[in-house]
């Protein structure tokens, strides 16, 4: 398990809002939905620009520069909202987060998420 770094008080992140931090040289964006906190690398996977100025709706963060949407739980690109074609990587690294006694801790080793298929799978009749 990765070592967790104490970053801030939960109340330092606005409810249903976000706050950017630099932790041991890594740019991390913390996003809060009610009392749940998510951590993404604070850079778009396509243009390496910061995500922190983007709109956070509780489930997705939108790149303010080209409108790509990334899931805050997995960092994966939401293809339905992305109309510019492939510019780079398909996801933004996410990091483990815990909230204990009103303090937010972040692990600096990215979490790996299972790959999702490019297209929905359909049941094929057996031959």
Image (tube, rainbow, N blue to C red):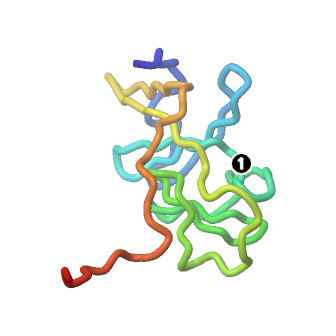
Characterize the local packing of mark 1: few (<14), some (14-19) or many (20 or more) Cα atoms within 10 angstroms.
some
Residue at the spot x=68%, y=19% of the render?
A: 24
Q: Which residue is mark 1?
A: 43
Quadrant containing the N terminus in the rendered view: top left
Quadrant in the rendering for residue 11: top left
**Left or right of 41 in this view: 74:** left
Residue at horizontal 40 percent and vertical 52 percent from the top: 33
Image quadrant holding the C terminus, namely bottom left
Is 69 located above or below residue 34 in the figure?
Answer: below
The image quarter containing residue 45 is: bottom right
Residue positioned most to the front: 127
Residue that lies at the very extreme toward the left in this rendered image? 126
Residue 21 appears at what percent x and percent y? 66, 33
Vertical order, 105 against 32 (above or below): above
Q: Residue at x 79, y 52 (%)?
A: 49
Q: Number of numbered discs present? A: 1
Helix, strand or loop under label 1: loop
Residue 52's spot in the image, x, y percent? 68, 51
Residue placed most toward the observer, 92 or 53: 92
Q: Of 113 and 19, which appears nearest the observer?
A: 113
Q: Position of residue 59 (x, y in %)?
A: 44, 61
Q: In the rendered view, does 97 fall on the left or right side of 70?
A: left
User: Residue 71 versus residue 8: which sits nearer the camera?
Assistant: 71
Residue drawn at 35 percent across, 75 percent down: 121
Percent of width and height locating residue 88: 74, 59
Q: Quadrant of residue 103?
A: top left
Residue sitting at the far top: 3
């Amino acid at each position: 398990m990765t070592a967790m770094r104490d970053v801030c008080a939960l109340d330092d992140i606005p409810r249903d809002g976000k706050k950017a931090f630099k932790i041991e040289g890594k740019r991390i964006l913390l996003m809060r939905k009610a009392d749940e906190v998510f951590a993404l690398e604070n850079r778009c996977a396509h243009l390496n620009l910061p995500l922190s100025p983007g709109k956070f709706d509780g489930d997705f963060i939108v790149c303010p520069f080209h409108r790509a949407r990334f899931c805050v739980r997995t960092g994966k690109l939401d293809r339905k909202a992305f109309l510019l074609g492939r510019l780079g990587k398909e996801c933004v690294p996410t990091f483990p987060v815990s909230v204990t006694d009103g303090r937010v801790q972040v692990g600096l080793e990215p979490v790996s998420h299972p790959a999702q298929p490019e297209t929905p799978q359909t049941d094929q009749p057996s031959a």
